[in-house]
Amino acid sequence: MTASQQHLDLAVESGTGGILLWVVLPYVSLAVFVLGHLWRYRYDKFGWTTRSSQLYERRLLRIGSPLFHFGILVVLLGHIGGLLIPESWTDAAGVSEHTYHVVAVVLGTIAGICTLGGVAILIYRRRTVGPVFSATTRNDKAMYLSLTLTIVLGLAATVAANIVGGGYNYRETISPWFRSIFYLQPDPDLMTGTPVLFQLHALSALLLFAAWPFTRLVHMLTAPLGYLTRPYIVYRSRDSRLGSRAPQRGWERIR
């Protein structure tokens, strides 16, 4: 039996629902994520922005935004490490499963609480500050709902399985399933037996990624690197003489 035939048999064993949730949906979400960003960049460059509301209110934003962004960055790095790096690699590096489990749970829980606290402040700010609320679109509301749901389910799964419960090693099931998607050999059976909270977290993340290109979250994929090399803008010069040397690029005198 070939590898492709074996994976096909596994997909059949998991049933139609398993195939739709853990094979079809991931590929649909991935395709919409990639093609949606290409379409957005091609036809909506001026809309590729966070639509900053800093001018309307700064006090809550100064607290909620760093809390959310630093927290989500740690969460993202943790997911990349946990999903993409096989357990055999960390074992070969001398990191025991117990050590990895403790570090991942502690850092993941702290980062999840920070992220949830940050997004709660940002939502409270949008709801209670009049100008910010007026600038909030239905798209923003749906984005905040989907993002918050994904964060809550991820944090709940971590707490329920690894703090309240006896522990769950997702690197034996969820991580191989995630990698199998990119190997083009999806194995839905790996997900059918995982705890419900982990399944709901994965499904909510897939839906979030499908909606990602059409929300303000697109700003995560861009960075204003041009500002690092852009010359200063000189509005007025106090020097009445032009000088003997030619000015540098961007410093030409404006008459």
Image (spheres, rainbow, N blue to C red):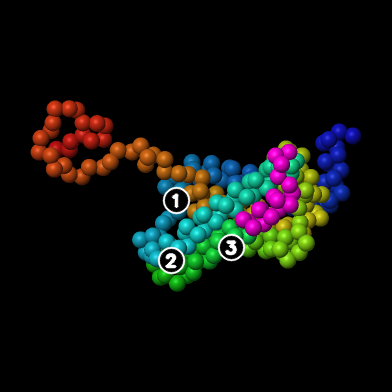
> Residue 12: x and y, percent?
85, 47
Question: Mark 3 is on which residue type?
Answer: Ile
Question: Mark 2 is on which residue type?
Answer: Leu
* Residue bearing the label numbered 2: 60
Q: Residue furthest bottom?
A: 128
Name the N-terminal-most of marks 1 and 2: 1
Q: Which residues are magenta?
A: 92-108
Q: Which mark is residue 113?
A: 3
> Residue at the location (73% across, 57% down)?
199
Give the secondary structure at mark 3: helix
Q: In the image, 185: left or right of 250?
A: right
> Residue at the location (13% across, 33% down)?
242
Q: CA distance from mark 3 to mark 1?
A: 27 Å
Q: Which mark is residue 49?
A: 1
Quarter of the figure with the C terminus: top left
> Residue 106: x and y, percent?
64, 58
> Do the residues bearing badges 3 and 1 touch, measured as CB atoms within 8 Å?
no
- Give the class, few, some or many, for how many residues have Cα within 10 Å of label 3's Cα (few <14, many ≥20): some
Q: Nearer the viewer, residue 43 or 67?
A: 67
Q: CA distance from mark 3 to mark 2?
A: 17 Å
Q: Nearer the viewer, residue 99 or 173?
A: 99
Name the N-terminal-most of marks 3 and 2: 2
